[in-house]
Amino acid sequence: MARGAVVFKPGDKVKYVPPGEEQMNGNAEELFHIGQTAEANHDTKRAIKAYKTLVRKHPKDALAPGALYRTAELTEQSNDLLGAATLFRTLVERYPSSPHFDEAIEAQFRIGEAYLGGKKLKMLGIPFAASMDKAVEVFAAVIRTAPYGKYTARAQFNIGLAREKQHLNDAALSAYQAVVDKFPNDPLASDAQYQIGYIWLLASKAGTRDLAATKKARLAFQDFLFRYPNSEKAAQARSNMELLENKQTSSAYDVAKFYDKQKHYRAAVIYYNEVIREQPGSPQSEQAQKRINELRAKLGDSIAEIPTDAEKNKTAALPDKTKNGALAPSTTTNGGLLPPPETDLSLPPPTSLAPDKTTAPPDSTEPESHGSPTESSTPEASPSPEEIASPTP
């Protein structure tokens, strides 16, 4: 049973101080003994105070690193995880030669994974977003204090997982790329490279206007298969590649036909060429080449010239938005409204290139529609979530 202290001071009334609250005095050895005695009596609060006092008053004593380590352990046992992580980090920064260095790094990593996994969050009342931020904070400290340790690559990878859970894809991509660049020989490098492709795969599924996400996903999976052909995820990567190739060609062909129907022939040729380049020999590629030949015969060879970067940028330019955030319909130079992009968000906005003045032959694959100005062809629907292989890091 813990006993309180009765403090006598000249000129003052007698004051009772609860156990653990009395002023700690003595040299390092005496304070360490007080802490150990308090631990034996299950008085965690008094033990922590004794150890902290030792570290503060005698930071260079040989007992200080051990006292700080025990403070951190007792703090973690008290469910003050972030406070414990801070104490463990202080130990490795202030006493790098401590025999508890590796244990302190491991403890930080353990705490970071508790935040990342959401364990104890309900009991601690920590919101999800704050939990992920704290996980990143702890893992970043592990990387900084032990840049070549056995937990460093995993800590970097876990930063990516935390940011991915928060849907902060740019930050997640940067974290995964750091694993690939800094730890290329670590087994986690292959998982990081796969996750890079997977993030872009989901972005392409959500619908992108310039096909950039689809291309980046393909490049990421190509890089994955080149670097890690024997990975257990190689089959998933190949399946994802096939899905992306079909999606990109289909999307480019639909975009080309969209521009063709609106008499934006130069923009249409840009995307017909995209189909030919991405899937040579495919049925859509043959149709694209046939249509380019028809346009060239009617409008001249200049219509099929390789587009400049400026033209590509104009073609991929995003439309203005209305005040409520919806996409506003764009207009051509002759004042006619183009089909609204909300009919299919995977379509790009209408090109800013001026329409051709001449009349091109009708598309032989699909007669030109004479319906209302809001009619447009709708490309194939994006694949369902079940069609996309989920990551298994």
Image (cartoon, grey):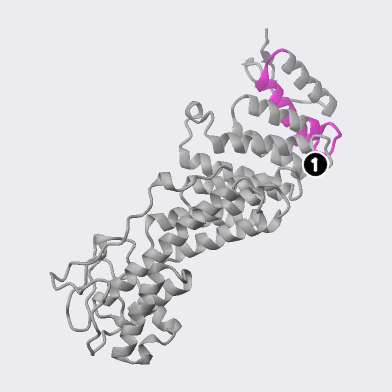
The majority secondary structure of the magenta stretch comes to: helix
Left or right for 100, reference 380: right
Left or right for 87, reference 63: left
Furthest-top residue in this view: 1
**What is the x, y in percent for residue 144?**
70, 50
Q: Is residue 166 placed above or below 120 in the rendered structure?
A: below
Report which quarter residue 37 is drawn in: top right
Q: Which residue is mark 1?
A: 95
Left or right for 174, reference 367: right
Report which quarter residue 320 is drawn in: bottom left
Report which quarter residue 22 is drawn in: top right
**What is the x, y in percent for residue 82?**
60, 36
User: Is residue 213 a member of the stretch shown in magenta?
Assistant: no
Secondary element under disc 1, as helix, strand or loop, is: loop
Image quadrant holding the C terminus, namely top right
Residue stretch rendered in magenta on the structure: 41-66
Q: Residues within 10 Å of mark 1 (few under 14, many from 20)?
A: some
Which residue: 55% across, 63% down?
A: 219
Total of numbered circles in the picture? 1
Q: Nearer the viewer, residue 224 or 210?
A: 224
**What is the x, y in percent for residue 71?**
71, 29
User: Is residue 59 a member of the stretch shown in magenta?
Assistant: yes
Q: Is residue 305 placed above or below 32 in the rendered structure?
A: below
For the question of whether residue 316 can be seen, the reply is no
Which residue: 41% across, 79% down?
A: 312
Residue kind at label 1, given as amino acid type:
Tyr
